[in-house]
Amino acid sequence: MKTKFEFFEIVERPEDKTAILYLNRPEKRNAMNWPFWRDLPDAIEEINSNPQIHAFVIAARGKSFSTGLDLESFFEQFGASIQAPLGDDRRKFFDLILKMQKGINAVYNSPKPSIAAVQKHCIGGGLDLISACDIRYATVDASISLREAKVAIVADMGSINRLPSIIGQGHTRELALTGKDIDGPEAERIGLVTKVFQTEEEMMSVALATAKEIAENPKLVVSGVKDVMRYSEGKPLEAGLNYVALWNSSFLDSADFRGALQSFKERKRPLYNQN
């Protein structure tokens, strides 16, 4: 089953309880015009509300993952607010940035794990998007960049906020302050992606296999792992330990847990999410 938005396409894989969210503007190398920012929260909500999707891959049609913000169309549409004197128009631009952040935040806050599969260009907003994902893969010929400094913008869609917990302060500052490109192997070396692949086909095969493996685990536990890790970011260890203790004391006595114990006793492989 396919669901189409102006910028996105969702391809469901019910046999695996997974889906692929495609960026679908290949003729512009998936440059992010207004429909990207408008449609992304709705596309993620479509995935969140579908009980048959337990994990999803974010991928892109065409040769590039994304070349980032479509500056030409963006300034055509919103240039007046950007260039206006201080006052109401600047407040409108502030509100616009918050609306744009909503889509990337929706990926990060989804209870369903996301896997980014990056080929060729992943620039600016593309890096913002994958930094909100749980797992990131790339091809060896990927070209990844936090490019905003080179176009006189402070990255404001979450990458400089999320990347320090992924790759550390040093690597984040180097990428953000220089705007330089890194390839797939370098992205793997610094921990931005966990695996690199020679071909896009190989990458997608592994991404889908990983999504399927995640989807086979109890969905309550999977969402719990995400919730606990998200809560623990930037907090003292004790706060995170208390939170996971609260989580397990509230949810551990589930049908999945009881089934797992019974399967262990019977030396059988437990089956979850069967309804």
Image: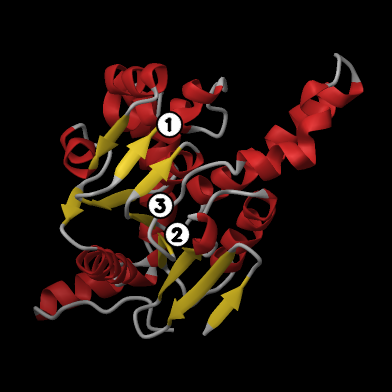
Q: Position of residue 220 (x, y in %)?
A: 42, 62
Look at the picture and state if 228 lies above or below 43: above
Residue 188: numbered disc:
none
Look at the picture and state if 16 lies above or below 244: below
Mark 2 Cα shell of 10 Å, populated few (<14), some (14-19), many (≥20): many
Q: Nearer the viewer, mark 3 or mark 1?
A: 1
The type of residue carrying mark 2 is Lys
Please report contact status of discs 3 and 1: CB closer than 8 Å, yes or no.
no
The type of residue carrying mark 3 is Gly
Q: Position of residue 150 (x, y in %)?
A: 48, 23
Q: Nearer the viewer, mark 2 or mark 3?
A: 2
Question: Residue beneath label 2, please?
Answer: 112
Q: Is residue 194 left or right of residue 147?
A: left
Mark 3, secondary structure of its residue:
helix
Q: Position of residue 21 (x, y in %)?
A: 48, 65
The residue depicted at 25 percent of the width and 44 percent of the height is 193
Which quadrant of the figure has residue 15?
A: bottom left
Which quadrant of the rendered structure holds the C terminus? bottom left
Question: Residue beneath label 1, please?
Answer: 162
Q: Is residue 10 left or right of residue 64?
A: right
- For the residues labelled 2 and 3, the Cα–Cα distance comes to 10 Å
Earlier in the chain: of badge 2 and badge 1, it is 2
Look at the picture and state if 159 lies above or below 19: above
Residue 248 visible, this orientation = no
Question: Residue beneath label 3, please?
Answer: 224
- For the residues labelled 3 and 1, the Cα–Cα distance comes to 20 Å
Mark 2, secondary structure of its residue:
loop
